[in-house]
Structure formats: C-alpha cells, structure tokens
Image (cartoon, helix red, strand yellow):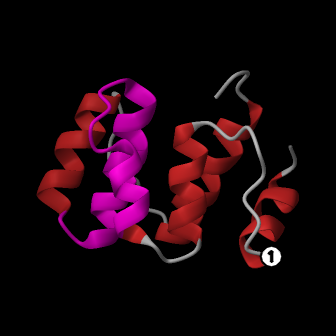
Amino acid sequence: MQFETFTASIHDNNMPPGLSVYLQSLWYDGKDDWHKAHSLVDHLNDSTACWVHAYLHRKEGDLGNADYWYRRAGKTRPSVSLQQEWETIVKALLQWPNI
C-alpha cells in the first residue's frame, strides 16, 4: 500500500482491510483517537509495538514514558516533529512484509 492511500483512508474514514495492529494504531492516531491507538499496542511487547507505543507517549507529552518505550524499541527519541515521526513510522511499516 502506498503512503498516500493510507492517509487518504484516514480522511475517508475507511480503514483498509488487512492492516497490521501497528498500522491500525497509527491509523486511529491519524484520526485523533489517541486512546484507541494506544489500546491496540499497550499490551504488546515486540520492538515494533514498542516503537509505536513510544511515539504515542511522546505525542501525549509523557516524555519519560516515551523514552522508556523508545529504549525497549532499540531507538532514541527523535528530534523531528510528531507529524514527521508519524510519517516515518507509517512509511516504514508499509514497506515491511506482513506488518
């Protein structure tokens, strides 16, 4: 799936079928539903879920918690805008098979 198709689906309020839980979380975040986005990944412990979880806590403004999840994901908190980070994560996940 192309990034533009993913973002258009957010504006059309029509989640594409077959999205991974990680992309579902970011889709809901794109809809400004932080709580739904968080609920999809907060119980997962793999590195991809930790990356999405870290971003969500950064967005929430809880930087200490975000940094914990970035460490669990093997990443550091980026210095880019939240929108840029969201785009980076979505684009990366759209290119991964079965993610």
Left or right of 12 in this view: 71: left
Left or right of 63 in this view: 85: right
The residue labelled by disc 1 is 12
Whether residue 24 is situated above or below residue 4 in the rendered picture: above
Q: Residue at x 53, y 40 (%)?
A: 21
Q: Residue at x 50, y 53 (%)?
A: 25
Q: Crowdedness of circle 1 by 10 Å Cα count: few (<14), some, many (20+)?
A: few
Q: Is residue 5 visible?
A: yes
Residue 37 x %, y %: 43, 58
Residue 88 sits inside the magenta stretch: no
Residue 60 sits inside the magenta stretch: yes
Residue 38 x %, y %: 35, 56
Q: Residue at x 24, y 34 (%)?
A: 71
In terms of image quadrants, where is residue 83? Answer: bottom right
In terms of image quadrants, where is residue 47? Answer: top left
Left or right of 80 in this view: 50: left
Count of numbered badges drawn on the protein: 1
Q: Which SS does the magenta portion mostly show?
A: helix
| Image: magenta residue range | 35-62
Whether residue 58 is situated above or below residue 74 in the rendered picture: below
For the C terminus, the image quarter is top right
Residue 33 x %, y %: 45, 73
Q: Is residue 81 visible?
A: no
- Residue found at the very far left of the displayed protein: 64
Residue 15 x %, y %: 72, 59
Helix, strand or loop at mark 1: loop
Which residue occupies the foreground of this view, 29 or 92? 29
For the N terminus, the image quarter is top right
Q: Residue at x 30, y 62 (%)?
A: 58
The amino acid pointed to by label 1 is Asp
Whether residue 56 is situated above or below residue 24 in the rendered picture: below
